[in-house]
Image (tube, rainbow, N blue to C red):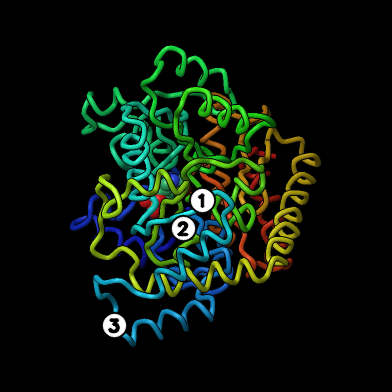
Amino acid sequence: MFETPRSEALYQRACKVIPGGVNSPVRAFKSVGRSPLFIKKANGSKLWDEDGHSYIDYVGSWGPMILGHAHGPIIEAVKKAATDGTSYGAATKLEIEMAEQIIKMVPSVEMVRMVNSGTEATMSAIRLARAFTSREKIVKFAGCYHGHADSFLIKAGSGALTLGVPDSPGVTSSVAAGTLTAQFNHAESVQQLMESHQGQIAAVIVEPVVGNMGCIPPKGGFLNALRDLCNKHGAVLIFDEVMTGFRVSPGGAQELYGIKPDLTTFGKIIGGGLPVGAYGGRNDIMSMVAPLGPMYQAGTLSGNPLAMAAGLVALKTLQERPEIYETLERLSARLENGLNGIIQRNRLPLRQNRVGSMFTLFFTGELVEDYDSAIKADKERFTLYFNAMLQRGIYLAPSQFEAAFMSVAHTEDDIDQTLNSAESSLRLAFDK
Ligand SMILES: *Cc1c(COP(=O)(O)O)cnc(C)c1O
């Protein structure tokens, strides 16, 4: 086992005062059989742990770091904003600029409200959909993760799936009864729910490209079918683009696939690494949000000037430099092609899914296109691979059920080093 004594000591200390030693379960490395790394600093494509090891990072803080860590202009913007005070709890010009920037980039968004996390964005969006439709039930997909609000911890993905608690205790049965579960890439499962709950479904919420059971792209026609079903049954279609927003294209998955949701939720990239979320969409729906309308939602630190400053630099950079997406595609394709070569040379039962700069290597020989196929992955072999990669200086998400992310700060050398490490790690995982 790869030794990290300083991280280990910090972990022991953390466990006495923080549940499980971490402030978010996926950081614990529990499912890959080791204690977590404590990170000291990051720059570009690299992370450094407290023991002084460096890693090529494919977690990217779980998605936000599309421009790389400690991106100069973002750091400058945060410093400058901090000099003028860290929070006022009052309206600022920066918030208008942020809203205008999002509306400019994302086709379906006409009005937007800033919040502090992706979780806040999705829980506000379903409250809004319920208020708008005067209906109570929502439909989500097995294995999709929409943050940790009660309504979403039903067949949830990400850490909940990794740790085997897709249905968390503490969620009341009455709340759970309000969430219906469908199968991703199977529109007929949504149709059945719509028909058996006529006039009761307020919203369908979906990760348009799933990241939280590993990367799973939508099959052709699936998102269109959701759009049609929501139109037909008067339900609000919510794209949870907390992960895909500004990542799979400047306008997110809705631009990539040409589908207009009614509401969209954001997080991650939108904050440039600071804690931010947002929800937005159609004018008539957003007009229900207080103080314009009766649906109450608030936040002491919402629209925080440091977060707005960081996020604005991130979004403007992505909008003004479309070649960034070409670079991300080139680097991601280089990694994908290299891995495919390794898979074929060594005849390994592995599958890759990728949409632009988000991707997953699944430890199964079969297609992965929904929850049932994702959970067939061989977690023991993944664990062997993960630990071998970590030892070789490659930092992957400590779970089979997560997407990996490329940043523009990654280099071809990084990719080639990753491929070298992957070949030896995979041979080790498969005893070849
Ligand atoms: C990360 C994520 C969330 C939750 O965002 P937090 O900022 O962690 O609360 C919600 N939805 C999706 C699709 C995500 O990837």
Which residue is at 53% across, 41% downward? 261
Q: Which is more N-terminal, label 1 or label 3?
A: 3
Disc 1 or 2, which lies upstream in sequence?
Answer: 1
Question: Looking at the picture, how far across and down is residue 327, in whole percent?
Answer: 72, 64
Is label 1 in contact with label 2 (beta carbons under 8 Å)?
yes
Residue 308 horizontal side relative to residue 224, left or right? left
> Where does label 1 land, which residue?
243
- Of discs 2 and 3, which sits in the foreground? 3
Q: Is mark 1 within 8 Å of ligand 1?
A: yes
Quadrant assignment, res 418: bottom right
Pointer 2 or 3: first along the chain: 3
- Residue at the left extreme? 17
Q: Is residue 216 above or below residue 16?
A: above
Distance Cα–Cα, label 1 vs label 2: 6 Å
Residue 268, numbered label: 2
- Residue 87 in the image: above or below residue 29: below
Question: In the displayed structure, does residue 156 sit left or right of residue 406?
Answer: left
Task: Pick the quarter of the image with the C terminus.
Answer: top right
For ligand 1, tell me if the residue under mark 2 lies within 8 Å: yes
Closest to the observer: 62 or 180?
A: 180
Judging depth in this view, the residue of 91 and 336 nearest the camera is 91
Residue 392 at x, y = what percent? Answer: 59, 60
**In front: mark 3 or mark 1?**
3
Q: Residue at x 47, y 84 (%)?
A: 76
Q: Secondary structure at mark 3?
A: loop
Mark 3, residue position? 85
Question: In the figure, is residue 153 to the left or right of 389?
Answer: left
Instruction: Give the residue at the far top of this rendering.
Output: 196
